Image (cartoon, coloured by chain):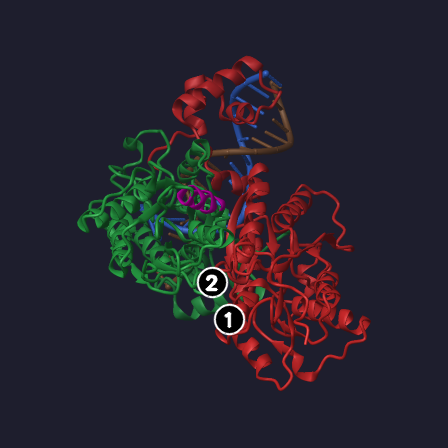
Chain colours: A green, B red, C blue, D brown
Amino acid sequence: MRDRPKIKDIAERAGVSAATVSRALADSTLVTAETRQRIHDLARELNYRPNVSARNLRTRKSMSVLLVVRDVGNPFYLDILKGVEATAREAGYSVLMGNTENDPLRELEYFNMLRDGHADGMVLMTGKLPPVGASRIGGLPVVVALEMIEDSGLPHVQVDNVAAAREAVEHLIALGHRRIAHISGPIPEPMSLYRREGYRLAMGDAGLEIPADYEVRGNFLLESGQECCQALFDLPEPPTALFVANDEMAYGAVHELRRMGREVPGEVSVVGFDDLYLSKAFYPPLTTVRQPRAEIGRTAMGLLLRILSGGGVDGGEPIVLPTVLNIRGSTAPPRSR
Amino acid sequence: MRDRPKIKDIAERAGVSAATVSRALADSTLVTAETRQRIHDLARELNYRPNVSARNLRTRKSMSVLLVVRDVGNPFYLDILKGVEATAREAGYSVLMGNTENDPLRELEYFNMLRDGHADGMVLMTGKLPPVGASRIGGLPVVVALEMIEDSGLPHVQVDNVAAAREAVEHLIALGHRRIAHISGPIPEPMSLYRREGYRLAMGDAGLEIPADYEVRGNFLLESGQECCQALFDLPEPPTALFVANDEMAYGAVHELRRMGREVPGEVSVVGFDDLYLSKAFYPPLTTVRQPRAEIGRTAMGLLLRILSGGGVDGGEPIVLPTVLNIRGSTAPPRSR
DNA sequence: CTGAAAGCGCTAACAA
DNA sequence: TTGTTAGCGCTTTCAG
């Protein structure tokens, strides 16, 4: 940072004005190809780098976007982050990490960073809006990914959680399971509700009753999967199959089943949701719904870029990316009695 | 971003000068407590937020730090990121994600972001320096975490990889294993070399020969663990235990062993390195070296903060954080023959 | 304690 | 095609 060359320095050496240098460095055709080249050479020689604060102040941009999640420590976000980062970088944007930990104050703080010029736009994955009222959010350059914020008027990139969950449960039913329980995410978060809805629809379509105790609430964390699993197998009539709302809890559930001496999938089948990259190395390899995470990241960031470049944004219809049910070793027909 | 209030607006309404507003908002004692309060109230009322670009330009700071890793998609970095983010945020800094994918050009680009005012400092976890020569790097506000860059003169936060690896292998030896193989990371990366060195030391101390084919090179990825494992068990005299240089490859190795019909730990014991958060739910629960990742992140960021606030920095002695060998279900005495 | 004035480094009208 | 000029919004001397 000490005495770095500025445009003026280049201008003096090149015998031109600062404006010309600025234009040349921006490859403006208004500058002779020859002087343009000369200035580029000079800039390289001096190891010149434009001061971003000055540029940002002048252009009223920051060339940064904010990626806001509930928990940066959650491996689920990794591929999304990767997709967002790649797409952002290709377009010359940097990615600022935002971590809310479900704290409304922090959620608000990240929105404020949009107003104070810290970032030009936001990819929001918390499923929540700060309590300032949707009116103030309306036109902001925000794309909601993964989760869904109803009536926000914001563009969404997501998967069809209901249909995906339904397909997962239908797979269990097709295998012959009747007593299928569900470990859900936190209620009433929309994502949890959708996946539960898919479960209910599949069960209903198959004419299967859902016993009251067959829906237990988790919190998407590993330990929660264990606990919920325990509760389910304390029941007088335990299930023969589990549809778990995410892979992490599914890991916990399988772990717990093993601890209880129940075989997976021999005695109990388990289906997860997300297809974390470890699920295939898990034992038994986990049957689970794959979300195209990297693509969600790329698509969301692409959409944001379009918004930032003034392109048309229809916050109307969400962009829905396809899921795939990856059938692996954790599901099998129920043990014939 | 549209017509946001600026200092001047507040100044006019308060009937004072812009300078006074600036001072008041900075809680300078040069301003009467009463006007200070009035201006704060006004700022809140107008929903004022200082323009960061203008402030950054003026103060020559960005209040951002760059966190540079090889691969943002690697779950290993999660807890570190979390630690860095938390510590940074407490101090008012934002975290910019940098992802090099081992591309020297991109590594250089991130260093340039330091020079162009994009960020004030960097936590570097790639184990590499761009090829500009250490001379230009010397005084930069950069902290190296996790990996080690020899002769860089930069402050380091790391663990003792040699000692940790040694302890892991000693555990296997203590169980009675003699034929212990090692799946290493990419050679010659320092981290891989250190862990291999620990393996060699433990073996040597126990008077155990290392057959030529017992050291195979992986790349820290899951598939690589599978492949290396396959190579080892194609040997005429396969090992009874594996020390794998990271958990991810260990998952792959265990997966492959299972595929080959070899029991873990009955037939083969496996020790990993890192203690990813899933290793305890893995089957069998993985014996592995735990690195205090969140603490590495917090410590590195704390060190960087000290540097940024002009505090003394001794790039001499690295800060070494302790590791713990977590003994779980993937290791057992060798099957008695 | 407060105000006037300068300027951080850059870009974009407007003129030439 | 190039130069001149005027700020972007803020902080910080320097005077008062």
Mark 2 in CB contact with mark 1 (< 8 angstroms): yes
Q: Compared to A279, does B60 lie above or below?
A: above
Q: Looking at the image, which is closer to me, B78 or B171?
A: B171
Residue density around tag 1, few if under 14, some if 14–19, many if 20 or more, within 10 Å: few
The secondary element bearing badge 1 is classed as helix
Residue B23: percent from left, percent from top: 56, 25
Name the spot of residue A191 as percent of width and height, x first: 32, 44
Q: Quadrant of residue B327?
A: bottom right
In-front residue for pair A9/A116: A116
Residue drawn at (74%, 73%) of the image: B200
Q: In the rendered image, is residue A313 in sight? A: no
- Residue B63 image position (x, y, % from top left): 55, 42
- Which chain letter goes with mark 1? B
Residues packed near mark 2 inside 10 Å, few (<14), some (14 to 19) or many (20 plus): many
Would residue B71 appear left or right of B197 to someone viewing this image? left
Q: Which residue is mark 2?
A: A283
Please state the horizontal and vertical placement of residue A211, each as a whole percent of the image: 29, 40
For the point 68% across and 62% down, which residue is it? B148
- Residue topped by disc 1: B258
Q: Chain of mark 2?
A: A
In the image, the segment drawn in magenta is: A223-233
| Residue B109 appears anywhere in the view | yes
- Residue A26 magenta: no
Query: For the point 51% across and 48% down, which residue is it?
Result: A73
Left or right position of A285 against A190: right
Residue A278 has which mark? none
Instruction: Name the amino acid type tagged 1.
Output: Arg
Check disc 2 and report its element: helix, strand or loop.
loop
The amino acid marked with disc number 2 is Tyr
Picture quadrant where residue B49 is located: top left
Whole-angstrom CA distance, mark 2 to mark 1, is 9 Å
Image: B81 above or below B28: below
